Amino acid sequence: MNISTGLKMEKEICISKDEIMENLIAEGRKQKELHRRASVIRDKNVSRNIYFRGLIEFSNICKNDCYYCGIRKSNNKTIRYCMPREEILKAVEFCNEADYGSIVLQSGERRDKNFINSVVDTVREIKNRYPKIRITLCVGEQNKKTYQRFFDAGAHRYLLRIETSNKEHYKRLHPKEMSFENRKKCLKILKEIGFQVGTGVMVGAPFQTVENLADDLLFFKKIDVDMVGMGPFIPSDQVPLNYQGYNQERNLNLSLNMIAVLRLLMPDINIASTTALQALNPIGRELGLKAGANIIMPIVTPTRYRKNYLLYQGKPCINESSKDCLNCITNRIKSIDLNTAFGKWGDSLHFFKRVKNDSN
Ligand code: SF4
């Protein structure tokens, strides 16, 4: 199968599934060249600007029990919290003053009325108080009516990670009451409503093959997403998913190569260099940016909550303040000679082209 990248600024590139797999396991010189090529494509298509998404992890209460997640409902070692609205607004105020341009409101998944109403009211209040700020939501699977309410309140981007595009693999990562089909349906609904839609997968997860990862990239292309965030799988003694033969370096390399190959396949989408990369290597986020990512998500959750939002073990930035993270990230971006895009929304360019194409 040949896949067109849709790249207009360079000679169009076609890459087969076999080539994708070959690139995913690239090491040494070949890997360096792959990352260099991906960053050139990033520069030409979405610029050298690195956009900020201030990440507010406002609640770790979740009704789900995903086998890989540190805040799954069965983990009784986690102290549960839900930030009061004023505290969320304070975190947004910080982002506003730091000129981050955008925030992400993230939590565990809940579908009860109180939670939904509270998210809607919070989004509306953020729009009122901080009209400069763009809002991304990441609060899991909801029904169409709820997604529409979120959108009408003022959220305009939504992140919902599929975690794996392989149905059988999905079943091995999630309890039986969770549905792969429903997650795909949610992604479709989000697009129909008009959100800029992001998804992503875990990289290096148990039972996952390189072919699965290649299929994940092709899945992103097929459903035509606007944004992608992929994190390496990191084992933990607080989750049931075990991993014999876990190899940290392999997972880091696979994660970086996933970013790079995705940039070749989808040159104009937004790709995050996730904090989890830094759990595997002190300069993991810089390496993600050098492999073609263009989004960074500094944590702005108040420090006292951070140790209870551990989706994976060894999460960095747990004891730092929002100010520390601002300074640290700024220096990291500058250290690799990319631009800090303060005050810019950094909307997905792909989204605007997609919407234009859909309306023609
Ligand atoms: S991955 Fe998300 S939905 Fe699953 S248990 Fe964790 S917070 Fe809940």
Image (cartoon, rainbow, N blue to C red):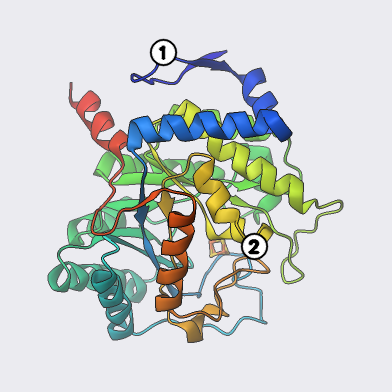
**In the rendering, at what x and y percent does residue 190 appear?**
33, 45
Counting the numbered discs, the total is 2
Q: Nearer the viewer, residue 240 or 177?
A: 240
Q: Residue at x 73, y 66 (%)?
A: 236
Q: Is residue 122 visible?
A: yes
Label for residue 279?
Answer: 2
Say what amino acid the circle numbered 2 marks: Ala
**In the rendering, at what x and y percent does residue 183 appear?**
48, 46
Label whose residue precedes the other's in the sequence (2 or 1): 1
Q: Nearer the viewer, residue 2 or 176?
A: 2
Say what amino acid the circle numbered 1 marks: Lys
For label 2, the crowd category at 10 Å Cα-Cα, with few meaning under 14, some 14 to 19 and many 20 or more, is many
* Helix, strand or loop status at disc 1: loop
Q: Quadrant of residue 114?
A: bottom left
Name the residue that disc number 1 marks.
11
Compared with residue 178, is residue 269 higher up or lower down, i.e. above or below? above
> Where is ligand 1, by quadrant?
bottom right
2 and 1 marks in contact (CB < 8 Å): no
Label for residue 283?
Answer: none
In the rendered image, which quarter contains the C terminus? Answer: top left
- Judge left or right: residue 183 versus residue 101: right
Q: Residue at x 18, y 26 (%)?
A: 359
Compared with residue 331, is residue 60 higher up or lower down, i.e. above or below? below
**In the rendering, at what x and y percent does residue 69 appear?**
63, 64
Q: Is residue 186 visible?
A: no
Q: Nearer the viewer, residue 342 or 210?
A: 342
For label 1, the crowd category at 10 Å Cα-Cα, with few meaning under 14, some 14 to 19 and many 20 or more, is few
* Helix, strand or loop status at disc 2: helix
**In the rendering, at what x and y percent does residue 162 appear?**
53, 46
Q: CA distance from mark 2 to mark 1?
A: 37 Å
Q: Indicate if the residue with disc 2 has its beta carbon within 8 Å of ligand 1.
A: no
